Image: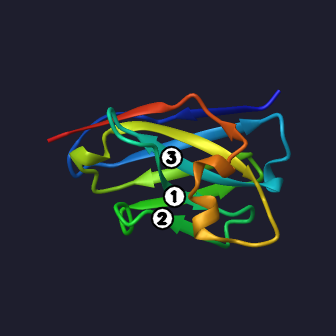
Amino acid sequence: QVQLVESGGGLVQAGGSLRLSCAASGFTFTEYAMGWFRQAPGKERECVAAIDWNGSRTYYANSVKGRFTISRDNAKNAAHLQMNSLKPEDTAVYYCAAAARRGFWSDTYYSTGARYNHWGQGTQVTVSS
């Protein structure tokens, strides 16, 4: 049974930091790229970051570049999203997702939600001003 379980969300003041974690089980972790998506009320879901199977390639949305860092620990079947300098506009539900890896890396491909096969239940991040 495939499971992706996010943790680490919460309430933080603007300028603060949070570290999200995603625990994966039920599939071969190294066969998948991992992504973090977010959705705010009334807005479309967007990919904020993605990482390929071995961590050698990453993608970041322009809105989070320089503030967020995605990483993965294949030994622990986990992915992380370090979020620094948080802004109120970062408030959203954050989802971890897994996409079957292909023989190439493409920012366009791995930033597209439809490419992802498995999703977590989400964790709320609220940034107060």
State the separation of the CA atoms marked 3 and 1.
7 Å
| Rendered image quadrant of residue 43 | top left
Residue 120 percent coordinates (x, y): 61, 33
Q: For this view, does 81 lie left or right of residue 88?
A: right
Q: Secondary structure at mark 3?
A: strand
Q: Secondary structure at mark 2?
A: strand
Name the residue nearer the viewer: 43 or 82. 43
State the separation of the CA atoms marked 1 and 2.
4 Å
**Residue at 48% from the left image edge and 64% from the top image edge:** 60
Residue 118 percent coordinates (x, y): 70, 38
Say whether marks 1 and 2 touch (CB < 8 Å): yes
State the separation of the CA atoms marked 2 and 3.
11 Å
Name the residue nearer the viewer: 24 or 38. 38
Q: Secondary structure at mark 1?
A: strand
**Residue at 58% from the left image edge and 69% from the top image edge:** 107
| Sequence-first tag of 1 and 2 | 1
Q: Amino acid at mark 2?
A: Tyr
Q: For this view, does 48 lie left or right of residue 107?
A: left
* Disc 2: which residue: 60
Relative vertical location of residue 54 with respect to residue 38 in this rendering, above or below: below
**Residue at 69% from the left image edge and 71% from the top image edge:** 105
- Which residue is most to the left? 129
Residue 124 percent coordinates (x, y): 40, 31
* Disc 3: which residue: 37
* Disc 1: which residue: 49
